[in-house]
Image (spheres, rainbow, N blue to C red):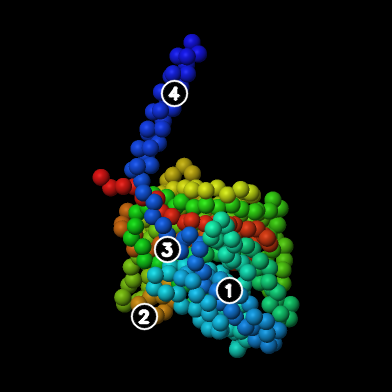
């Protein structure tokens, strides 16, 4: 009868609700430092007169502050975040790569807007395609020629981290072009190349150590999260969870080559103060010592992106399982 069917449906719904409540009860949420996107450091950089002498604005996540002078930015000890908007100085000429990472009003606070921006450098006909990116780690400012030739050598990737989260939770939306065309400025002038650009979020949890004699830094991968966003998501997806997979994931049916070891040429500063490559030697179940979190409006590579692609993110949090 209809009444019996309705009764069974209500019982099933009740059991589902109880199970869902139990699942939520077995988890807890932990905010990520400055992950609510409501605090920003604002930097005003005045470019050299040869470039026009304009003042540009740079933003980076951190305790609310305003800096009105040129110079290298050093984040406070509690701030794990770096970003793609940086101060550069080459042959005495000062400039700022800006507008790719911007706070944007949302509700009673802010979110973070990451956008692919094609910038003319006012030096001859030089251009730079900059992807809006935030990451755990820090840029070594002021950037110089090495940032153009080997940009990752100017980033100290990762920060200390010993947690065991099961997922990253965040709010996000995206504007992704459907065209299969990417702008490259690897040779200074904009060139169109084939390829479809996506926004990307990845996390590498690593167990790192240093060879004290050689200064080389090694790591084993203990946790991985990799998500590509390849289509427009016009409305906010709130409380979205991206699972972290622990241990060796190379045999998983859905494993992708780009999730593997040494796919990014990551650098770090060793105990001798020298920038060295982080060499991932394998997978393991060791305790994590460091985390590399990378959130960007492009996955096309250095100085390559689809102009205008945009990723908005807010309320970054860890999801943990409650211990018995």
Q: Earlier in the sequence, mark 2 or mark 4?
A: 4
Packing grade of label 1 (10 A; few <14, some 14-19, many >=20) is many
From the viewer's perspective, tell me whether residue 208 is left or right of residue 34: left
Which disc is residue 218 wearing?
Answer: none
Q: What secondary structure is marked by label 1?
A: strand
Q: For the point 56% across and 56% down, which residue is it?
A: 107
Q: Are marks 4 and 1 in contact (CB under 8 Å)?
A: no
Q: Which residue is mark 4?
A: 10
Q: Which residue is mark 2?
A: 272
Q: Earlier in the sequence, mark 3 or mark 4?
A: 4
Which disc is residue 58 wearing?
Answer: 1
Residue 104 seen in this snapshot: yes
Q: Which residue is mark 3?
A: 33
Q: CA distance from mark 2 to mark 3?
A: 28 Å
Q: What secondary structure is marked by label 2?
A: loop
Q: Residue furthest front?
A: 108
Q: Is residue 234 above or below residue 266?
A: above
Q: Are marks 2 and 4 in contact (CB under 8 Å)?
A: no
Q: CA distance from mark 3 to mark 4?
A: 42 Å
Q: Is residue 59 or residue 39 the one in the foreground?
A: 39
Q: CA distance from mark 3 to mark 1?
A: 20 Å
């Amino acid at each position: 009868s209809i009444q019996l069917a309705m009764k069974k449906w209500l019982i099933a719904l009740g059991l589902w609700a109880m199970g869902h409540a139990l699942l939520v009860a077995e988890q807890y949420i932990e905010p990520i430092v400055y992950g609510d996107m409501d605090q920003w450091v604002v930097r005003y950089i005045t470019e050299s007169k040869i470039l026009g002498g304009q003042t540009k604005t740079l933003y980076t996540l951190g305790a609310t502050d305003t800096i009105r002078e040129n110079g290298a930015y050093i984040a406070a000890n509690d701030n794990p975040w770096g970003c793609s908007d940086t101060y550069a100085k080459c042959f005495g000429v000062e400039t700022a790569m800006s507008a790719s990472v911007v706070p944007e009003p949302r509700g009673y606070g802010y979110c973070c807007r990451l956008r692919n921006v094609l910038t003319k450098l006012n030096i001859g006909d030089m251009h730079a395609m900059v992807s809006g990116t935030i990451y755990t780690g820090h840029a070594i400012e002021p950037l110089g020629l090495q940032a153009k030739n080997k940009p990752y050598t100017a980033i100290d990737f990762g920060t200390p981290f010993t947690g065991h989260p099961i997922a990253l939770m965040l709010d996000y939306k995206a504007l992704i072009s459907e065209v299969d065309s990417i702008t490259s400025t690897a040779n200074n002038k904009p060139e169109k190349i084939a390829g479809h650009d996506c926004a990307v979020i990845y996390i590498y949890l690593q167990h790192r150590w240093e060879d004290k004699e050689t200064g080389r830094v090694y790591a084993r991968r203990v946790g991985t999260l990799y998500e590509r966003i390849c289509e427009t998501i016009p409305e906010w997806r709130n409380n979205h969870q991206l699972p972290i997979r622990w241990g060796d994931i190379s045999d998983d049916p859905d494993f992708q080559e780009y999730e593997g070891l040494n796919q990014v040429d990551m650098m770090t500063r060793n105990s001798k103060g020298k920038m060295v490559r982080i060499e991932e030697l394998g997978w393991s179940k060791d305790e994590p010592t460091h985390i590399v979190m990378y959130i960007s409006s492009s996955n096309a590579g250095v100085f390559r992106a689809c102009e205008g692609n945009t990723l908005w993110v807010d309320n970054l949090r860890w999801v943990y399982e409650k211990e018995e």
